[in-house]
Image (tube, rainbow, N blue to C red):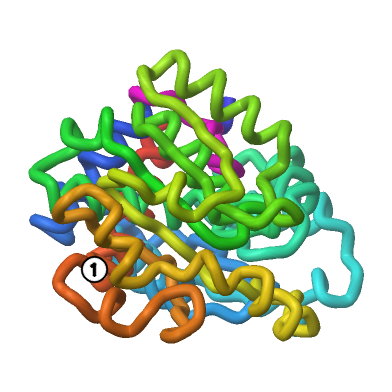
Amino acid sequence: MTRHFLRDDDITAAEQREILELALAFRRDRFLEQPFAGPQAVAVIFDKPSTRTRVSFSAGIAELGGYPLVIDSATSQLGRGEPVGDTARVLERMVSAIVWRTFGQDLIEEMAAHSSVPVVNALTDSFHPCQILADLAAVADARGGVDALAGLSLAYVGDGANNMAHSYLLGGALAGMHVRVGAPADYLPDERIVLDAKRIAAEQGGSITVTTDHDDAVACADVIATDTWVSMGDEGEYEARETVFSGYQVNARSLEIAAPGAQVIHCLPAYRGKEVSADVIDGPQSIVWLEAEYRLHAQKALLAWLARR
């Protein structure tokens, strides 16, 4: 049966660990494995703007020995209304995997339902699982290995209803972390995802906390994460969101109440003076640039792992 990666819990805790270990190995040796030698093509489809996703998947597929077939959906038949299932049936006969950065989770699930090759979620409105693999790998690298993740407290503050919050809940729970989400009352995570995360956390020795208080989320945290307050498609809500989220900025005070040496991560792009202060994201406790680099290594690890299935 073809394995897909559509949300963070499409893999088990043991499988997540295997992928993270491979990501760290790829950082040590970028050409460790080349499962797409030939080169075999991997379709990388974009419905949304991208920098890190486009560059990391394109470079990564090439380093895996393959050919990144980058498709902007607006210039493809997908953009003209071709059924997703029809596109999947065509692509599966020509490529070794399909990577899609799109809108609704239902779209990528439909692609996977009709594809005999692995489908990877490069971002949807609901989840950003490749980013969380990169984040966890970066934290593991900075702390001496994947064994360091279990038991760490990871605080995410900001928009708790977005894809990053959902993926931190699921991915952090799989890693055995204590995940705390701090967000305004009108921007809390989907309760169904919270329940899934709590179930996983109970199995892996972690925990899940959702709060409306920034300090409660960040207190004694080992890792602090945030994201832009205005996601793609929500630009019209900028002024209202800036007012609502002003108390959730990651700044020097956040680090004062976090654990000593707490690390700061951000999926980027970052808006200094908004969700994170410049002195923090550019300061010594930030591992944002290592995190961005790990998009390359973690996605290579994921694709190589899927190619073995």
Q: Which residue is mark 1?
A: 286
| Residue shown at the point (67%, 77%) measured from the top left | 243
Q: Which residues are magenta?
A: 3-14
Q: Is residue 146 magenta?
A: no
Left or right of 120? Residue 272 is left
Q: Quadrant of the C terminus?
A: top left
The image quarter containing residue 203 is top left
How packed mark 1 is, by other alpha carbons closer than 10 Å (few <14, some 14-19, many 20 or more), is: many
| Residue shown at the point (88%, 58%) measured from the top left | 83
Res 93 seen here: no
The image quarter containing residue 297 is bottom left
| Residue shown at the point (27%, 36%) measured from the top left | 152
Number of marks in the image? 1
Along the line of sight, which residue is nearer the eye, 301 or 198?
Answer: 198
Left or right of 58? Residue 183 is right
Name the spot of residue 86 as percent of width and height, x first: 83, 54
Name the spot of residue 281 as percent of width and height, x first: 30, 76
Q: Quadrant of the N terminus?
A: top right
Res 251 seen here: yes
Name the spot of residue 94 as percent of width and height, x first: 60, 57
Name the spot of residue 211 as percent of width and height, x first: 57, 43
Say above or below: 138 vs 79: above
Amino acid type shown at disc 1 = Ser
Say above or below: 183 vs 289: above
Along the line of sight, which residue is nearer the eye, 204 or 44?
Answer: 204
Say above or below: 141 vs 116: below
Residue sticking out furthest to the top: 203
Looking at the rendered structure, the secondary structure element under dot 1 is: loop
Left or right of 17? Residue 216 is right
| Residue shown at the point (40%, 41%) measured from the top left | 307
